[in-house]
Image (spheres, helix red, strand yellow):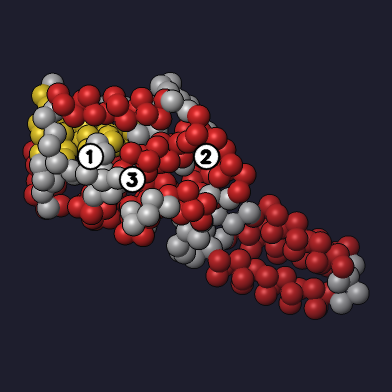
Amino acid sequence: MENNERGLAAWVDARMARLNPSGEWQPNAGRALAMLRRRARVRRAGSVGAIAATMAAGLVLVALSGPRACANPVECAEADQAVSKSIPSDVVRNYKESGSPTAKVTCEIYSDYQCPSCAMAFATIVPQIVSQYVKTGKVKLIHRDYPLPQHQYARLAARYVNAAGELGFYDAAVDYIFKTQSVWEKDGSLDAHMAKLFPPPAMAKLRLLVANDRSLDETVASDMALAVRDRINQTPSMVVVANGKRQLIAPIPSPALLRSYLDSLLK
């Protein structure tokens, strides 16, 4: 029986070693392995049945390891945080910033969460900038708040998103607020919508920050002061910083034109 059990354990180890999970989701291999071995011990009386059950469980894990959409952006963000903690951080970064701090080019995007054109830009243009330039270390991206006076809930939205940033979930909150813009902008029901994104414990912390953290307004005020210097008068607007110069681009051009411009600066 011990030989069978050792053989089963070796088979499980080999099976787990061959799994190649996608980058978007990581199964808990240790927990899965423990569960498989526990099932094997329970079924000692029928080693053939135990092996069959283990093979079925292995096939399920293989199926789950394929690409899949993130069901809960906050949980995915927590996983990203766990990975990022393993990377040495010589510089404490602003949650609005992403990319290499030594990138040759910086793109600063001024947006209003209640602006439909901003929602479109963050759904189409910004993801391309992130994948092709930010993640490759070529460009540093900075998201700046510029709530327009005609948008009743834009400042409140910025407050909620920046509070999420304080908790480590800035990108997930930005994405979610823009995607649900057409719903919450009707009545300002930002709290109810954010509660759909965050689990209750995190949402409780978020509400405390929104209610009490004055720095959430200060970061918006700081961005708006920079907007005056950059002569921002519409959203979305982009300021490209390269070679010691700041160049305002408004409106943001098509992805093809923007790529051409950035490539010329990176030569």
| In contact (CB < 8 Å): disc 1 and disc 2 | no
Q: Amino acid at mark 3?
A: Tyr
Residue 206: mark: 2
The answer to whether 149 appears left or right of 39 in the picture is left
Crowd rating for badge 1 (residues with CA inside 10 Å; few <14, some 14–19, many 20+): few
Q: Name the residue carrying label 1.
A: 149
From what the image shows, is residue 9 above or below residue 117?
below
Q: Name the residue carrying label 3.
A: 153
| In contact (CB < 8 Å): disc 3 and disc 2 | no
Residue 39, x across and y down, in percent: 80, 66
Q: Quadrant of residue 13?
A: bottom right
Residue 115, x across and y down, in percent: 24, 49
**Placement of the C terminus among the 4 image quadrants:** top left
The answer to whether 50 appears left or right of 57 in the picture is right
Look at 47% across and 64% down and name the residue there: 68
Cα–Cα gap, marks 3 and 1: 9 Å
First in sequence, mark 1 or 2: give its number.
Answer: 1
